[in-house]
Image (cartoon, rainbow, N blue to C red):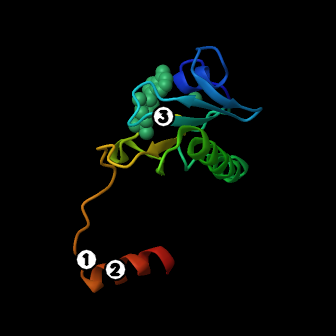
Amino acid sequence: MKMDDCIFCRIANGTIPSKTLYEDESFRVILDVNPATKGHALILPKEHAADLYELPDEAAKDVLVLAKKMAKTMRDRLGCDGLNLVQNNGEAAGQTVPHFHMHLIPRYAGDGQTLGWEPREAASEELEEIRRKMTE
Ligand code: AMP
Ligand code: ZN
């Protein structure tokens, strides 16, 4: 399904122009217009899926293979020192565009960016409760 009112459908399928780094029949990789660092890119599937929950298994497999290929090109051509893969699902997790996308964020020593979370203490009861909910 391609959605006319979805901005990433329109970018992925070429109706809205973008700085494209890679394209094949299933994906387009574009530069993020508000990059966290130089080279911050987004992998967009051409078929609409709102998020990871909706993403077909085939696309889910292919997206990581493509991320690896793009990561190597970023390392070799941009000279980044590291790379973060980020993929947000739902407003609570920071998703602002409801079309699945994977962020590729090249990292440079001392780039001043902070991606991450505050680690907290967790009682072993909490860990056990989660393990039980997820597995029983
Ligand atoms: P997220 O918060 O994970 O949904 O990420 C959405 C990302 O899309 C943000 O990093 C935005 O800067 C980026 N973005 C939004 N609109 C565009 C656009 N037209 N072209 C390129 N990147 C965009
Ligand atoms: Zn879409």
Q: Which residue is mark 1?
A: 122
**Ligand 2 under 8 Å from disc 3 Cβ:** yes
In the picture, measured across the screen, residue 119 lies left or right of residue 5, that is left
Looking at the image, residue 58 lies above or below residue 78: below
Three-letter code for the amino acid on which mark 1 is drawn: Ala
Element type where label 3 sits in the image: loop
Q: For label 2, count other residues whose C-alpha is less than 10 Å away and answer few (under 14), some (14-19) or many (20+).
A: few
Q: Which mark is residue 92?
A: none
Three-letter code for the amino acid on which mark 3 is drawn: Pro
Three-letter code for the amino acid on which mark 2 is drawn: Leu
Residue at the location (59% across, 21% down)? 11
Residue at the location (55% across, 48% down)? 52
The answer to whether residue 6 is seen in the rendering is no
Looking at the image, residue 115 lies above or below residue 32: below
Q: Nearer the viewer, residue 43 or 68?
A: 68
Q: Earlier in the sequence, mark 1 or mark 2?
A: 1
Report if the CB atoms under discs 3 and 1 are less than 8 Å apart: no
Q: Which residue is mark 2?
A: 127
Mark 2–mark 3 distance (CA, rounded to whole Å): 31 Å
Report if the CB atoms under discs 1 and 2 are less than 8 Å apart: yes
Q: Which residue is mark 3?
A: 98
